[in-house]
Image (cartoon, coloured by chain):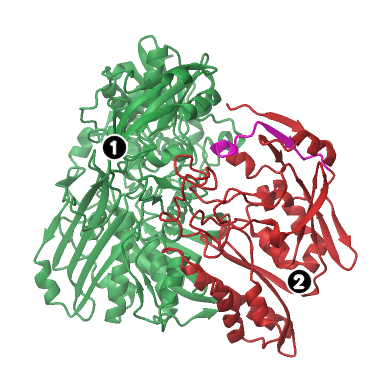
Amino acid sequence: MREFGYLRAPDVSGALALHGADDGTRFLAGGTNLVDLMKAGVERPERLVDLAELPLDRIEETAGGGLRIGATVSNSDLAAHPEVRRRYPALTQAVLAGASGQLRNMATVGGNLLQRTRCAYFTDLARPCNKRTPGSGCAALRGEHRNHAILGASEHCVAVHPSDMGVALTAFDAVVAYETLDGPGEVPLADFYLPVGDTPHAETALPAGALITAVTLPPAPVAARSRYRKVRERASYAFAIGSLAAALDVRDGRVHDVRLAFGAVASRPWRARAAERALTGGPATAEAYAAAADAELAAAEPLPDNGYKVTLMRNLVVAVLTELAEEAGR
Amino acid sequence: MTTATRGTAAPGAVGTGHTRIEGRDKVTGAARYAGEIPFGDLAHGWLVLSTVARGRVVAVETGPVLGMPGVLAVLHHGNAPRVETQYVGSLGPPDPVVGLFQHDRVPYAGWPVALVVAETSEQAREAAEALQVRYETEPHDVGFHPEHAAAYTPESVMGQPNEAVKGDLEAELAASAVVVDERYGTPEEHHNTMEPHAATARWDGGRLEVVDSNQGSRWVAEELAHLFSLDLASVRVRSEHVGGAFGCKGVRPHQVGAAMAATVLDRPVRVVLTRRQMFSVVGYRSPTTQRVRLGADPDGRLRALGHEAHGVTSKLFEFVEPSAGFGRSMYAADAHHSVTRLVPLDVPTPTWMRAPGEAPGSFALECALDELAEKCGVDPIALRERNEPAVGPVSGLPFGSRNLLACYREGARRFSWADRDPRPGTRRDGRWLVGTGMAASTFFVGAAPTTAAVTAEPDGTFTVRITAADVGTGARTALTQIAADALEVTPDRVRVRIADSDFGQAWLAGGSMGTRSWGWAVLLAARELRERLALGGAVPEEGLTARSDTSDVLAALAQKERHSYGAQFAEVAVDVTTGEVRVRRMLGIFAAGRIVNPLTARSQLVGGMTWGLSMALHEEAVRDAASGAHVGADLAGYHFAAHADVPRIEADWVEDTDDEDPVGIKGIGEIGIVGAAAAIANAVWHATGVRHRTLPIRPDRVLDAAGAPGTPGAGAAADGGPDRA
């Protein structure tokens, strides 16, 4: 077997020191994606630094009604947390829509954000992939791309980010906190993922060797009435072909506040700001929802076999916002 | 094990539910499978498959790999032992993929080009992944479509005529008041048994011994004897427990590679396939396109039944997925024409997969009949009843028991079919459109020559020896029940030993013929033994053994149309705004002869129906046109139904006795999948008003079809034919 070093970090500073911003070192959290990629030969780390003992598995309330979620909180614990369920129900729904019970027990919040695309060409070493091997080409562009991006992609990569959790976090303006050997930093999730451009292999704004320590959710009263809807090719245990995190606050028939984020349409969870702008202050009607979705999807550049995603996302926006408005009216 | 009867004088094990004899061993992990049986001095082989779709191997850079830790050998076309592939086995010539490393040609992506053998499986894998193989590539062709220039019509399928003609199809179509002429498509589908293929081979006193996971140890032994030019007596194959087979567990590269390496290294060698390797070296179900033409009188009486199917084979070898044959025994019509054509491509050779022919064929024809029922304004069950034949519609032969009408009646009663509003697209439950559909199933009934031995032991117990295979179905338990009844003892006094080629000639677990073929042989031997025991006298120390061979009784069997039948019902919910299809319930009522073990029989039928659900909504292997290789050849990329997709599924059966049949057992291995996908597709039409003629019925297809203006409503359709090869 391919040998690699395995180290256990006692704490955050220890983890950073053990990593040392070394190219061949990877942090290991739940391992639900990294270990698979190691088996496939996509990831060939020389060393793993296991984060299991780090004290980052807590969810704390912040002043004003937000939450600070430790980076090694498991998916299962996040979904079950009473304050997550009360303040950000779409986040619980998103987490529970992903993977399986066993995987959610292992998978962590930080790891979820850093998971890699499930584009089948990315994990097939015999095929070109710019994300895996920069400059080798994109096999999906003219190949199998039914579940690839319609927004924000480039001719170099059309892969989508697979996270469900990240879609809900994006809708609620999450901020990623990290530590480096040079000190702490933070970056809004909206800026966390880099544009695809001609560097699809460079995925996040994290500095080399940085360790995600927490994800902070600012207070968002609108999020208390939120929903995550995921569409996939079977009822469970499949990645989304399109998903939506939505929150809606309607007052006197008009949209007071709204959050919309799309999943499985881009290389990152896609905050639908154009749609939010189109809706805010306007009437809470199905026609307005559809027009808002169209405003967002005007930028879509579907490939030959994934144009259905435009229809799907438009339909999801209308259906979920209609549901949220009806439930609020009851 | 539970038994319904006690006492030697009251047989009656057959027909009562028995848990699997080896069930406890399996769930506790005590049952060992082929890949986990310990061997001293065991070495491990790892296959290397071609990454190019056509060309030849120019170089296998063994040097660096031979220097890696633990590596013992690298077998490839330049150094592998020769094997004989020019033979005709009991089921025909071998798939050329078992002619391992005999030449430098690469006929498709995933062709085995080397086997790396090392002290541990991990070392073998690392070395196999590091092995550099250089190729000279040639243009490949993996695009399947019926108009392909190389399409041709095979002469026969497993010795039966491929083309069936009765009457003048075109004339009857022209004279028909109502005509359905549609194309249907099914994708490439893969077996994906829970247990991947695994074999350990070793030489023991001049005999090749193989511990394997297969569906016929005698069959595999025969094939290995041919390949390695050995006497059959010099090969022993055992396969005690098997984690699924479905048609893909015959002789395959893993046994051949293990035997080659055991020969070269003179020590035991194990080869286990990975899930990804299974996608290219164990066979699969061919994709199909099928044109069905039905012509009928206004009341739905069929005048014409035309079924022209196309499938794929490799350029190396002819395998026919005989999809067009489904209607030949099912429906009376003045004219029949059915034929399956093949398109040879640079792809692996397909093979048998649960209900070969009937599974895709029933999808096309049973959907077309639903369309005819709609056009005629006739209930789909009434339409089928109207076209029930008195004798074989093409063969003219009398039927064995044919209780299809009873399946319709019982199914309709339990599914409340009489309350069904035939209009499509009219029932809503929240965001879901709801509909119901039905289809018929059939599978042929056969038996093949088999030998068995039953021994009375001095302690009053009995031992049955037969080269049967229990591929997870409960065959061992069923044979115990059959033997117990024939011996007039309780099952706990019968020990059934199976899956050892030394036990003699026997049919394999395939063609739904296992229990019928094996059970027959066990019955004959047990009856003879009982007669000999009835003569009195003590059982000698070595036991008293009676042997049987069913060759003669099978040859004497009258020519008949022998089939099992079924009626499948499904209720689905469709959200046309997201494309999601959910099956809410399924009911299958079967007429399948004597049911030996209701407990395992129900599981097998429900399993088949579940696979039909999977076929309808999920399963599809995708080939990349540029590379000619699969995309996402693993269980993340190849979707089948997850638990959450599988609703309440009921399977049951009607009385189906045939007084003229000596055993009355028909076999239930395949029929559960037949018609299930059609019932679901017909229910999707009933829910939405849209005909989906291409499987699987994916969300994007539902969305694209619903995107047409004016839908949901009758008349819209998503037409057949795979949209990508």
Q: Residue at x 34, y 32 (%)?
A: B135
* Near-viewer residue (B4 or B359): B359
- Which residues lie in the magenta part? A38-54
Identify whether B73 is placed above or below B622.
above
Q: Residue at x 49, y 67 (%)?
A: A301
Q: In the visual, does A129 lie left or right of B180? A: right
Quadrant location of the C terminus of chain B in the rendered image: bottom left
User: For mark 2, what is the residue?
Assistant: A223
Chain B, which colour? green
Quadrant location of the N terminus of chain B in the rendered image: top right
Specify whether residue A182 is in view: yes
Q: Mark 2: which secondary structure?
A: helix
Q: In the visual, does A34 lie left or right of B572? A: right
Is A10 contained in the magenta span?
Answer: no
Q: Residue at x 70, y 82 (%)?
A: A280
The residue most toward the right is A63
* Near-viewer residue (B149 or A186): A186
Amino acid type of the residue tagged 2 in the rendering: Ala
Q: Residue at x 26, y 18 (%)?
A: B229
Specify whether residue B505 is in view: no
Q: In the visual, does B421 lie left or right of B351? A: right
Q: Give the numbered dot on residue B107.
A: 1
Q: Chain of mark 1?
A: B
Q: Residues within 10 Å of mark 2 (few under 14, many from 20)?
A: many
Q: Chain of mark 2?
A: A
Is A52 contained in the magenta span?
Answer: yes
Which chain, by letter, is red?
A
The residue most toward the top is B205
Q: Measuring from the top left, give residue B585's x and y in whole percent.
A: 50, 65
Identify whether A83 is placed above or below B29.
below
Q: In the visual, does B657 lie left or right of A283? A: left
Indicate the quadrant where residue B269 lies: top left
